[in-house]
């Protein structure tokens, strides 16, 4: 390559790099380094809460199947429907994390707080939740699924 073309920033290898292209690539790199949006943070929270809620419903379902209650078959069937929906939503949540380029791992636990580390578009951070907050969120999540199931049953009954 000629000495005039070396080190002037316009030529790299055998391709010419226009200033507009440089600016575009620089802006793209900066856009990749933005912190998680509130929607992404909510997605991370949901991805943490939903597996806990699912484990609780699965355990209650197993306990219900072994119980001697009269309405055991109804409760067990309702729990199975909820479990199926929760698993589907968990898969969607995991897929959304991958599509959003977010990795989430549990970092540490103590008596009051559970910490998770995340990497979102190259930015590392921590998401902390108190155990009390998690209990409330798990309870609300299970309540939403139960409410949804009841609404579906009521709609099915009103159609008959």
Image (cartoon, rainbow, N blue to C red):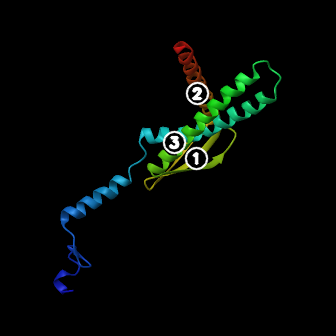
Q: Real-space Cα distance between discs 1 and 3?
A: 20 Å
Sequence order check, earlier mark of 1 and 3:
3
In the rendered image, residue 11, in percent from the top left (x then y), is placed at 21, 76
* Residue positioned most to the left: 4
Q: Is residue 67 above or below residue 124?
A: above
> Residue 24, position in %: x, y?
25, 59
Is residue 145 toward the left or the right of residue 14 in the image? right
Mark 1 vs mark 2, CA separation in Å = 25 Å
Q: Can you identify the residue that label 3 sits on?
A: 92
What secondary structure is found at the residue carrying circle 1? strand
Residue 128 found in image quarter: top right
The Cα–Cα distance between marks 3 and 2, rounded to whole angstroms, is: 16 Å
Looking at the image, tell me whether mark 1 or mark 2 is earlier in sequence order.
1
**First in sequence: mark 3 vs mark 2:** 3
What is the residue that sits farthest to the right in this orientation? 68
Q: Which residue does the numbered mark 2 point to in the structure image?
A: 145
Q: Residue at x 61, y 35 (%)?
A: 84
């Amino acid at each position: 390559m000629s000495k005039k073309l070396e080190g002037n920033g316009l030529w790299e290898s055998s391709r010419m790099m226009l200033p507009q292209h440089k600016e575009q690539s620089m802006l793209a790199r900066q856009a990749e380094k933005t912190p998680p949006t509130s929607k992404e943070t909510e997605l991370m929270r949901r991805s943490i809460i939903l597996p806990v809620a699912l484990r609780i419903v699965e355990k209650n379902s197993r306990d219900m199947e072994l119980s001697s209650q009269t309405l055991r078959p109804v409760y067990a069937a309702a729990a199975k429907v909820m479990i199926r929906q929760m698993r589907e939503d968990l898969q969607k949540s995991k897929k959304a994390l991958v599509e959003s380029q977010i990795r989430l791992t549990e970092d540490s636990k103590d008596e009051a707080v559970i910490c998770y580390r995340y990497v979102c578009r190259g930015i590392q951070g921590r998401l902390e939740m108190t155990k009390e907050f998690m209990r409330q969120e798990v309870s609300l999540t299970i309540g939403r699924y139960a409410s949804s199931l009841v609404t579906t049953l009521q709609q099915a009954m009103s159609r008959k």
